[in-house]
Amino acid sequence: MDEEFSQGYSRVLARDLVLNGVGGNTASEALRAGYDPKEIWREVCRVQDVPPSRWLGRDIPLKD
C-alpha cells in the first residue's frame, strides 16, 4: 500500500477505509480476521479506483 498511496496515507486507509468486499471491515480488521491479504488489496484497489494495471505493483504488469 505504501508504494501506491504513500506511507502516511496507506496507514490512514488501512485504519479507516471500510471495505464491503471483506465483510465491512477495514484492511487492518480484515487482516486480523484472517482474510487473504491479496483479497484485501484487490478490494482497496477497487474502492480507491486504482487502475488494474497497478494492482500487482508498478514493476509487474497484470496479465489478462
Image (cartoon, rainbow, N blue to C red):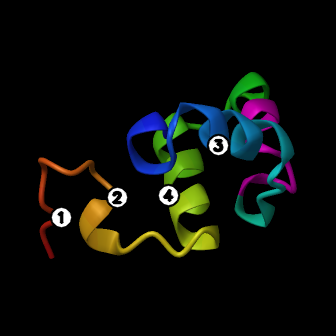
What quarter of the picture does the C terminus occupy? bottom left
Residue 6 point in image, percent of width and height: 50, 40
Q: Is residue 28 left or right of residue 44?
A: right
Q: Earlier in the sequence, mark 1 or mark 4?
A: 4
Residues under labels 4 and 2: Cα distance?
7 Å
Type of amino acid at the residue the image marks with label 3 = Tyr
Residue underneath mark 2 = 55
Say the numbered circle drawn on residue 17.
Answer: none
Q: Quadrant of residue 51?
A: bottom left
Residue at the image position 45 percent from the left and 69 percent from the top:
50
Q: Is residue 53 left or right of residue 6?
A: left
Q: Are marks 1 and 2 in contact (CB under 8 Å)?
A: yes
Residue at the image position 59 percent from the left and 60 percent from the top:
43
Residue underneath mark 3 = 9
Residue underneath mark 1 = 62
Residue underneath mark 4 = 42
Type of amino acid at the residue the image marks with label 1 = Leu
Q: Nearer the viewer, mark 1 or mark 3?
A: 3
Residues under labels 4 and 3: Cα distance?
17 Å
Q: Where does the magenta region start and end?
A: 22-30
Type of amino acid at the residue the image marks with label 2 = Trp
Residues under labels 1 and 2: Cα distance?
7 Å
Q: Is residue 60 left or right of residue 52?
A: left
